[in-house]
Image (spheres, helix red, strand yellow):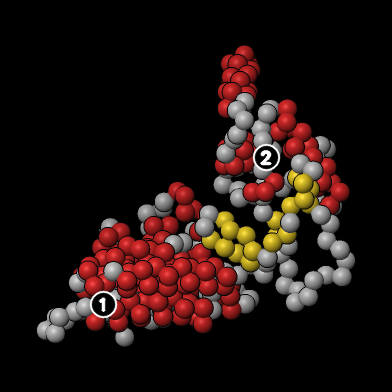
């Protein structure tokens, strides 16, 4: 058994050398390999920087030494790291910059400038950990795309404009919505204004006797998507959503009007701020509990049936 383990270890090292012997390695492969070397799971987002003695680097000097070790490792294995593609951001709620100078982060001898916001998989987050800049960006892009649709509207009827809007404009405003849905309503209204302009454009192209149903509100679509994620997490036990799983509420020790549905409710996580209260887990856990108290939708057998029923339930005044 020991010989088999040694052979498997050598085989893994040989495969790793072959994989990383090229002149360019993807960021995902590089970070995954680094996590494996540090004994972390691939589900962790950003691994900490460990020093040679196994402790986590917390001082700027120690972090610089660890980064230099990474650069040396890349040169030894002929892996080119791109400092110009590296993003750095100082997370702070200070209104003014700190009095002490911020040390320069060097990667391969080249400074990595600090940015006010960074983009991760197409979602922009700023230095105070909000998504307001992202909302403004996608609202501006969606308005520009809608103007392009308006320029070709003379070639389309109302149904064609609706299809083009759903495919090109609304899809942009619904990319990763559960991530940035904690934004204030004043920012989310920027997206609603874009859809309102699209609705007016569709009505202008409609025939006189044609009745057009209104476009589904964006907030309603986000709420349906959020409840579907909760359903897949707690009813279908989807593995990759296990991190979002909340504990079930304990049954009441006495009889109440909501005691019968207590077993299907979830414990709402504590939220200290309004932004945290609007985030995914607090918001949709509360909405799930309200749905359980008012309906029996949590007992549906399929996701499609649940989605259709939840859509009708949210639409109710």
Instruction: Name the residue at the top extreme.
Output: 3
Q: Quadrant of residue 191?
A: bottom left
With respect to residue 122, does 46 lie above or below?
above
The disc placed on residue 57 is none
Q: Look at 62% across and 26% down and name the residue there.
A: 21
Q: Residues within 10 Å of mark 2 (few under 14, many from 20)?
A: some
Contact (Cβ within 8 Å) of mark 2 with mark 1: no
Calculate the distance from the C-alpha at mark 2 to the C-alpha at mark 1: 49 Å
| Location of residue 253 with respect to 306 vertically, above or below | below
Horizontal side of 139 relative to 272 (left or right) equals left
Locate the C terminus and report the quarter of the image it occupies: bottom left
Identify the residue at image location x=60%, y=34%: 24
- Residue closest to the eye, 86 or 69: 86
Give x and y (percent) for residue 314.
Answer: 33, 77
Q: Earlier in the sequence, mark 2 or mark 1?
A: 2
Residue bearing the label numbered 1: 202
Q: Nearer the viewer, residue 199 or 95?
A: 199
Location of mark 2 (residue): 81
| Badge 1 element | helix
Quadrant of the image containing the N terminus: top right
Q: Is residue 110 above or below residue 172?
A: above
The image shows residue 200, relative to residue 304, as above or below, that is: below
Q: Residues within 10 Å of mark 1 (few under 14, many from 20)?
A: many
Quarter-wise, where is residue 18 in the image? top right
User: Circle 2 sits in a helix, a strand or a loop, which is it?
Assistant: loop
Task: Give the percent coordinates (x, y) of residue 5.
Answer: 61, 19
**Residue that appears at 79% across and 40% down:** 68
**Residue at image point 62% right, 60% down:** 118
Q: Is residue 265 visible?
A: no
Q: Let me know if residue 60 appears in the view.
A: yes
- On the image, the x and y values in percent for residue 55 come to 80, 43
State how many labels appear: 2
């Amino acid at each position: 058994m020991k010989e088999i383990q040694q052979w498997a270890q050598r085989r893994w090292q040989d495969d790793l050398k072959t994989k990383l012997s090229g002149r360019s390695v993807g960021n995902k492969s590089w970070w995954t390999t680094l996590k494996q070397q540090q004994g972390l799971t691939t589900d962790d987002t950003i691994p900490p920087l460990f020093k040679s003695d196994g402790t986590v680097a917390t001082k700027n000097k120690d972090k610089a030494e660890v980064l230099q070790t990474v650069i040396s490792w890349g040169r030894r294995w002929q892996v080119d790291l791109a400092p110009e593609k590296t993003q750095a951001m100082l997370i702070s709620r200070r209104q003014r910059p700190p009095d002490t100078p911020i040390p320069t982060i060097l990667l391969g001898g080249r400074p990595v400038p600090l940015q006010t916001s960074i983009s991760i998989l197409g979602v922009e987050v700023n230095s105070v950990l909000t998504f307001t800049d992202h909302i403004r960006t996608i609202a501006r892009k969606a308005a520009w795309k809608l103007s392009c649709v308006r320029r070709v509207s003379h070639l389309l009827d109302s149904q064609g404009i609706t299809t083009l809007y759903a495919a090109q404009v609304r899809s942009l405003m619904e990319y990763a919505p559960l991530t940035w849905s904690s934004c204030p309503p004043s920012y989310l209204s920027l997206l609603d204004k874009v859809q309102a302009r699209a609705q007016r454009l569709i009505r202008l192209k409609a025939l006189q006797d044609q009745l057009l149903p209104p476009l589904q509100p964006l907030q309603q679509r986000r709420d349906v998507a959020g409840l579907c994620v909760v359903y897949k997490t707690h009813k279908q036990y989807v593995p990759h959503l296990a991190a979002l799983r909340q504990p079930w509420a304990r049954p009441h020790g006495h009889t109440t009007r909501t005691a019968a549905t207590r077993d299907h409710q979830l414990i709402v996580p504590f939220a200290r701020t309004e932004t945290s209260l609007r985030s995914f887990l607090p918001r949709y856990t509360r909405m799930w509990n309200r749905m359980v108290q008012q309906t029996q939708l949590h007992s549906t057998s399929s996701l499609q049936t649940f989605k259709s029923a939840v859509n009708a339930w949210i639409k109710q005044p």
